[in-house]
Image: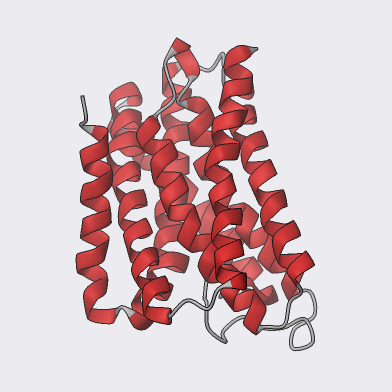
Amino acid sequence: MPDLLAAGGWGLLAGSALLLGAVAGFLIRIPGRVVAGVMAFGSGVLISAVSFELIAEAHERGGFLPTALGALGGALVYTVANVGLARRGARHRKRSGDQQPSEAEQAGSGTAIALGALLDGIPESMVIGTSLLGGGSVSVVTVAAVFISNVPEGLSSAAGMKRAGRSPRYVFALWSGIAVLSGMAALLGYGVLGEASGATLAVITAIAGGAILAMIADTMIPEAFEDAQLWTGLITVAGFLTAFGLSHLG
């Protein structure tokens, strides 16, 4: 039970960064280049976590084939779901400019954006929960990577929601709800997979890694490139090396 609650708490902590970013993005006028730069940095952080904390761990537990199939499966499921939500108005949910449609422009887009935000956050949170399995401690790097990347996600998306005319109540209720659900997803990841075999955990971890990597390419990098452009690569590498350095501390 203590580990179960700890999993939920770590997931909630990482998810709360979405709300922090949303508050900043909605209440403070932040230059587009700053948003893009922070998004690029967060992308690099997540790419590092996927590489060294998820895919590498999955390979160690289950070998190449389960890891590859899991990653491809996660990317496929995410992409199919993302395509469906994009057609309903959630394509630009992480964009801070005028790309997000208002409810008047596309009915149901608010719900689609909310579901899209949930789709983006669930794989990250479940990985936090599974990192506690086997009596180990939580992966600090994974939590840090998710937290750091969630800030620009919430910031950019909330700025775009404000431009689309969505109310503060909608924006803050959405990100508060996603933060709570992130904690529940981490708790679920620990509770449901507690008795899973090493091969099963390898596949689940790889699925999450594939989904996260697809999410980075589909939703984070486009926003990063919008204003940072030629600086995007350099900033992304800085984020990657930051997370890589954290994983090798001690």
Image position, residue 233 (x, y; %): 22, 68
Q: Report if residue 36 is visible in the image.
A: yes
Q: Is residue 132 above or below residue 209?
A: above
Which residue is painted at 56% across and 84% down in the image?
99
Q: Is residue 225 above or below residue 104?
A: above
Foreground residue among 69 and 11: 11
Image position, residue 133 (x, y; %): 49, 18
The quarter of the picture where residue 195 lies is top right
Which residue is painted at 38% across and 68% down in the image?
221
The quarter of the picture where residue 161 lies is bottom right
Q: Is residue 197 above or below residue 113?
A: above
Q: Is residue 232 left or right of residue 107?
A: left
Image position, residue 75 (x, y; %): 46, 53
Q: Is residue 86 left or right of residue 65?
A: right
Question: Number of marks in the image?
Answer: 0
Report the quarter where the N terminus lies: top right
Q: Is residue 154 left or right of residue 62?
A: right
Report the quarter where the C terminus lies: top left
Foreground residue among 35 and 209: 35
Image position, residue 236 (x, y; %): 27, 62
The quarter of the picture where residue 38 lies is bottom left
Q: Report if residue 91 is visible in the image.
A: no
